[in-house]
Amino acid sequence: MTDKRELELYFHIPFCIRKCLYCDFLSAPGEGKTKAQYMEALIRETKERAGDYRNYCVVSVFLGGGTPSVVSPEQIRVLLETVREEYDLAEDAEITMEVNPGTVDERTLSAYRQWGINRLSIGLQSADDRELAALGRIHTYGQFLGAYHTARKCGFSNINVDLMSALPGQTLQSYLATLRKILALEPAPEHISAYSLILEEGTPFYEMARRGELQLPDEECDRLMYEMTGNLLERAGYYRYEISNYAKPGSECRHNCGYWRRREYLGLGVGAASLLGNCRFRNGDSLEAYLTAPLNVREEMQELTVEEQMEEFMFLGLRMTEGVSPLEFQNSFGKSMEEVYGPVIEKNMRDGLLEYRGRISSGEPARLALTGRGLDVSNMVMAQFLFP
């Protein structure tokens, strides 16, 4: 039994083979020398920060990007060894790595598993090669199948597959074909993340759409894709535990659940964000500055006010289908949820967008959650929990 606080670690590895046309993440191709310098700086930051977190137990680790699998397996090994040497890593910690199907093989996947990575998140997006090409992805569906089955062979029993809908040239039929192909995998993925394409300012897709050069499914088709995702996955034994995430029972992404529940997390690497106590901060976006002095790039330190903490409790917690606990709110802020948000809750309940659901055996009151209709317009509902 330990009295240490729980901590999540996120490592940002910003490199990729080629930036996808829709991507607005902090990522770009990089030369081998730059990648090596970056991983050295990341390992240095990981070591030097460790002394500040002796009173924490690390319960999850997430390697994201970019495409972490484009750096050498040896560099991943050293990074994970550093975590084990410098931090109190829980015996059952979830350790996730994002991979692109075009960047892994049996040797690398076997090494990842041997070094303790126990969850893979594979960025497929579509099972249609024409749609993948339109997105600027570097892989084919055949390469995904090879990577997926090889990962199973190497001992990975917890795999997420990322899918996207409302893509250029995509039809309802081609999207449903993608879903059915993924559900037909043997064994099927434990977790599926399914998102609609969002046109982010500054991306090639955004500019193409602005010029009228991007042919996207219409709003009705987008809506049908969204509805069919939930229907098909539910029938296949997945449950929707968050707005865009579906899992077999017990296979929810523990790391991401920590974000939505406001668990403390430390982000390491260029551009990585953190939440410690009630302070949010992030590392700057300059790769050059990070390579030069990885310990001197923190910026945007924000000590959250009580009102900001309440806002986050609500709009992050409501992303999860289990909803938010009135008892936790009361214990955290010394006020009832109804006292602070009563009119907002009442209005959305009248509109059929929020409901009180379930009762825990300990006697805790039912949780406040989005209804099915509320999930459809979640951004509009959650925005109402922001103070003016």
Image (cartoon, rainbow, N blue to C red):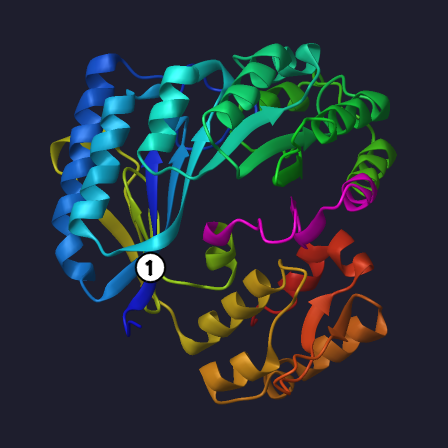
The percent coordinates of residue 263 (x first, y second) are: 42, 63
Residue in the picture at 65% in, 82% down: 361
Q: Is residue 78 on the magenta stretch?
A: no
* Quarter of the rendering containing residue 233: top right
Query: Left of 309 or right of it: where is 10?
Result: left
The quadrant of the image that shows the N terminus is bottom left
Residue 322 seen: yes
Residue in the picture at 50% in, 23% down: 153
The percent coordinates of residue 145 (x first, y second) are: 60, 17
List the residue tagged with mark 1.
Answer: 7
The percent coordinates of residue 386 (x first, y second) are: 57, 68
The quadrant of the image that shows the C terminus is bottom right
**Residues drawn in magenta:** 230-255
User: As rendered, which of 348 and 318 lies closer to the eye?
Assistant: 318
* Quarter of the rendering containing residue 191: top right
**Circle 1 Cα neighbour tier, 10 Å, few/some/many (<14 / 14–19 / ≥20):** many
Query: Left of 188 or right of it: where is 221?
Result: right
User: As rendered, which of 365 and 84 lies closer to the eye?
Assistant: 84
Residue 15 seen: no
Query: Number of marks in the image?
Result: 1
For residue 341, above or below residue 11: below
The percent coordinates of residue 73 (x first, y second) are: 29, 23
Q: Considering the numbered disc 1 on the image, is that residue within a helix, a strand or a loop?
A: strand
Residue in the picture at 67% in, 27% down: 186
Instruction: Give the amino acid at mark 1.
Output: Leu
